[in-house]
Amino acid sequence: MSIRQVSIFIENQPGKLAEVTDFIAKQQISLRALSIADTQEFGIVRIICEDIDKAVAALKAAEYVHTVTEVFAVELADEAGSLAKVLATLATVGIQVEYTYAFLSTKKEGSAYMIFRVDRNDDAIQALNGAGIHTVTQQEIF
Amino acid sequence: MARYYQQDIECASREQIKALQDERLVKQVKHVYDNVPYYRNLMDEKGVKPEDIKSTDDLHKLPFITKADLREAYPTGMLAVPMKDCVEIHSTSGTTGKRVVAFYTQKDLDIWHECCARAIMAVGGDENDVVQVAYGYGLFTGGAGLDGGAHKVGCLTLPMSSGNTDRQIQFMKDLEATILCCTPSYAAYLGESLHEMGLTPDDIKLKAGIFGAEPWTEEMRRSIEKSLGIKAYDIYGLTETSGPGVAYECTAQAGMHINEDHFIAEIIDPDTGEVLPEGSKGELVFTSITKEAFPLLRYRTRDICVLSREKCPCGRTHVKMTKPMGRSDDMMIIRGVNVFPSQIETVLLEQGYTPNYRIEVDRVNNNDTLDVFVELSNEMFSDTVKEIAIKEKELASAIKTMLGISPKVHLVPAKSITRSEGKAVRVIDKRKLHD
Ligand SMILES: [Zn+2]
């Protein structure tokens, strides 16, 4: 299962990130994860949130440059080597990882999820499921 | 089969046109010197007498007229006949200062309308056509000029004026308009509205459009042609020189023929005022050689373009001007190259970007730098840093192809470019701040 992530384009200037996160908080949209990629000039804020349609409508109304991308998430098990197994599986089918970030579960204590953005999302999910690795649904993380 | 409104003159030989221009210029200079004290003073200051102008070869001896002169001479300082001999006036919008009022005798109107008639026939129009004039009527020259031209050709003329889009489309459809005359932005809007009303180009009879009075791009031409199912043609004119019809495009869609029996065109260096050789890019200067009421000699248009005498497939021999590439007021010289903001805007639109941009020019270690900031739209935004960097590089290379110099492109969020009164501030030249 893939997960939908919302990305927002901001200037890399003091206060811009706070402005965006404040804005999302004011919409009463529950956030599960947030990560930032930045260069000297701009930043991309990526969020996993509960009501995506509501988030997109609010961002559009406020004229934030944004897009929705398909990503996938896996639950990181306790045992060592589980991340290595995910990466190895992706490598065998030639999938390129653009970026990845982790966040803690609010449902299961001590459990963590890892989000992956890859070049071929559906192929990646198929390969992982084939290797017995569960990809998390949007419902599971909320 | 090409058809003409006045074939003998539209297809006259270069020698015939030159002889006509020589004769008319000599007469016109005398007329202006005798009747316009304002210009007589300019000539006296320069030490030029009407006798010094024996042919068009002497044109460069005459002083220029600028927009500032016209403002100073407001309202009647440039009038060359008694006001009672005039039958009509038109006026500029005055958005950038005092208005300019242009006067017309009956003969001036006839010539102006003939020029517009040539433009209509040059796009394939004849007496069987229905011409929808959706330029504004009134003080603006657009409506009156094309309306008069359509009458001369014998077309059924729909004097719609601008606005009331639903009615425009209803009349276009019900009265089977074949030629549309309006501003290119209004044509684009009519095209969108047509589709929004659930209609397609198959539901209308329109075949051509004559669009002018504002800058537009080739990209816009293609999109208007597609949405209305027509061929779109450019027309050029200024209130100061009569209005639309000073120059017009033919079906070759490659430059606008200047009506050389009524106007002499020159290209000058905007900084020095020197006349440039044919084919050079520079500021367009017009001398009207048949105007009675408001005859302007060497009027600086501020429009930058190139003239070409290459043979045109339409058979017309009059010199062609390119679409204005910018205003001489906006021209920047960066690393020795003439750059106009409009050139950068053209690239942005062609590459699918917003026209919201800012240009910053600076000098670092004696080298000019060019930075272009462009607002990103949702459609162009992709979620990885790498893809944005690639887009910046691609846009920089497209701009380099256009200008010949490399910019640094910065994609920025929407609304991050400062606007003054709704319009984005286009150019910041920091070199001027340091000097
Ligand atoms: Zn032609």
Image: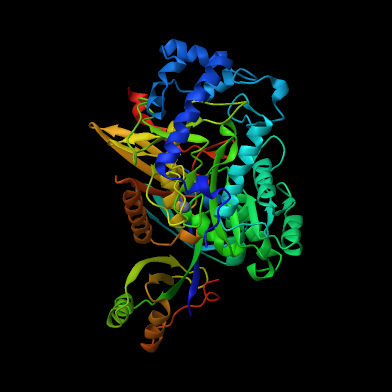
The residue sitting at the left extreme is B365
Q: Is residue B109 visible?
A: yes
Whether residue B220 sits left or right of residue B188 in the image: it is left
Whether residue B118 sits left or right of residue B266 in the image: it is right
The percent position of residue B301, horizontal first and vertical second, equals 49, 32
Whether residue B367 sits left or right of residue A128 in the image: it is left
Q: Quadrant of the C terminus of chain A?
A: bottom right
| Residue at screen point 67% across, 47% down | B152
Q: Nearer the viewer, residue A75 or B304?
A: B304
Q: Nearer the viewer, residue B343 or B87?
A: B87
Q: Is residue B189 above or below residue A98?
A: above
Where, by quadrant of the figure, is residue B318 drawn?
top left
The percent position of residue B174, horizontal first and vertical second, equals 76, 64
Here the colouring is: rainbow
Q: What count of labels does the image hold?
A: 0
Q: Nearer the viewer, residue B170 or A3?
A: B170
